[in-house]
Amino acid sequence: MSDALDSTREFLSAHAPFDQFEPDALEFLLPRLETRFYASGERITDPDAGPAQRFYIIRQGRIRGETPSEDEQVSGKAWELVPGESFPIGALLGRRAVLTVHRALEDTICLELTVEDFDRLRSRSQVFNDFCARRLISLLDRVHQGLLNRNLGEGGGSGQLNTPLGARIGREPVTCDPKTPLRDALTAMRDQRVGSIVAVDADRSPVGIFTMTDLLSRVALNEVPLDTPLQQVMTANPIALPESALGFEGIEIMAEHGMKHICVVADGKLVGVLGERDLLTSNPLTLDRLVRGVLRAGSVATIAGHLREMPRLIGAVISQGAEADQILRLITRINDHATRRVLALIRKDYDLDGIDFTWLAFGSQAREEQALRTDQDNGILFECTPGDEDHVRERLLPFAQAVNTALDECGFDLCPGNIMAGNPECCLSGQEWERRFSRWIDQGTPEHLLKSSIFFDLRGIEGDLSRVESLRSKLLHKTAFNSRFRRQLAANQMSIRPPLGLFGEIRSGADGINIKLQGITPFVDGARVMSLAGELPATRTHERLDQAVAAEILREPDAHDYHAALRYLQMLRLRSQQQALGAEREDSNRIRPEELGTLESRVLKEAFRQARKLQGQLAVQYQL
């Protein structure tokens, strides 16, 4: 008996979530598990057998679901299970019959627990209860922690980017009155050995900040007298974040505004000041240096040089606990800065006086989901007198083509489909854009549907952004009242299927899996269809999912699973791109599932299953 228990203990220690069980929970579980053999082809569960009575852990062999109902095709629950996996958790929690016939695909051995002991185990083990309540998210937490632990072993951070800013404050902030003479403020900074001082009002609210950078640029170089009041040389109205904000929010603000320090407040009162190195402790390349380098670049080549250092910065951000969608937003913010700087540099060489235009981003840049390798999807929206469109376009196109070339030099590949501002089809007046979108919605040809999947994600980068929002509002209103077009979009997105076989096994070709196309795209396309149906203003995929829940288009539990699956696929793509860039390979979106560990293979399969589930929900909704 002891040898059998030791053998079972060893087996469980190799599979999640049992490898993380509390000692007393494991000791409760081990003697209550029954071992049973099932011959190949034998049924293990049956929908006609009444409420589920046993919890199964596959120890040896394989099990598959058979004859799925229509509902199961939507839920994606008919799939192959392998050693270490367990079932039927949903039926046990819901006190219902199983929905799938589970049958041994080969001679199989299961470890089994009665429903009564299943309930008792949940009450004894927080790990097990959490796994049962949110299986995918629980597994992803394990993967994420494993990545952090590996990075820690390599000198990485401790995941502080997803801890509150208040927890990162190590000392009281150095403050003064805004009217304090500059000499006294500098003396305080020297005595306290800090690189910044914050001017506060009578309520201790921050009204300005002065840093060593300000000392050089505003005082020393301009020979400002040291008796000058601090308020004349400080940065007024500093951006402040509440102490409950996460560390990554601080990094985002720094990237967006090109600053080194942020104020942290509680109920509006200053409680601390954090610098970039307080948040990115392991990063040899400062975010400030990269952003400021881009903002101040005097040439396209200089911008390109700074952007080549992006993978190192992103590696540091990943190592310190940032989620994939946070990292993609950071990359996009830096790329937005690069785009604006390129526009400013190139514009000097062209006579565009009198032309009022807005530079547009489409696709992943519009969704703020750009990865380390990306191509261009951009355009121009201009205003002009009716009838003068061709003349204005003729003046803009040489400029736009030069910008496209410059962005290519910076690492943003030219779009293979020519969806770029230098293409006359992408350089249109506001009225022309509106007519084009209306035509696509009204006609809905295959070409229109393909273009809609790119152009309907749009965001203004430079210029009058209100025009873009107005165009988006008209677009959403029109699609919300055109169910035929939305049905066509939903049908179109079904053409890209996650790489799962009939019973849920991952199907990988000789060159691996395109994780962007086969994994991420179904979520992006599905969320877009939901946003068009509900006139939801968001462009980011994760935000669209949240808004779909608020609009009662999507159930909250489903959204949680979709968030988790998408974040994992996005992180997998980032890791693949880092490896490809390091090896100077071009296949930056391809992964090989066989190179993943057991746990990540389970998560990948579940992530693909969630993508298939989302597609199935749309198929039912639009009767596809």
Image: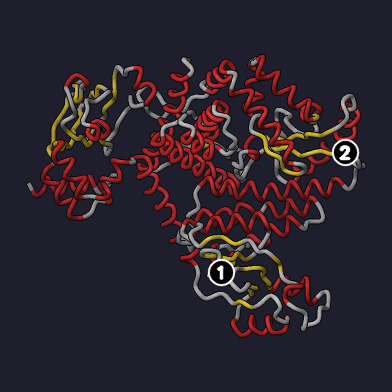
From the viewer's perspective, is 92 left or right of 624? Answer: left
Residue 270, disc: 1
* Identity of the residue drawn at 87% across and 26% down: 386
* Identity of the residue drawn at 30% across and 31% down: 81
Does residue 525 appear in this view?
no
Q: Quadrant of residue 93?
A: top left
Q: Earlier in the sequence, mark 1 or mark 2?
A: 1
What residue did someone put label 2 on?
A: 355
Q: Position of residue 589 (x, y in %)?
A: 56, 37
Which residue is at the front of the view, 322 or 173?
Answer: 173
Task: Report how far apart the C-alphas of labels 1 and 2 lie in the structure.
Answer: 45 Å
From the viewer's perspective, is 19 left or right of 595? Answer: left
For label 2, the SS is loop
From the viewer's perspective, is 119 left or right of 238? Answer: left
Please state which amino acid type lies under the numbered disc 2: Ile
Does residue 295 appear in this view?
yes
* Identity of the residue drawn at 19% across and 25% down: 44
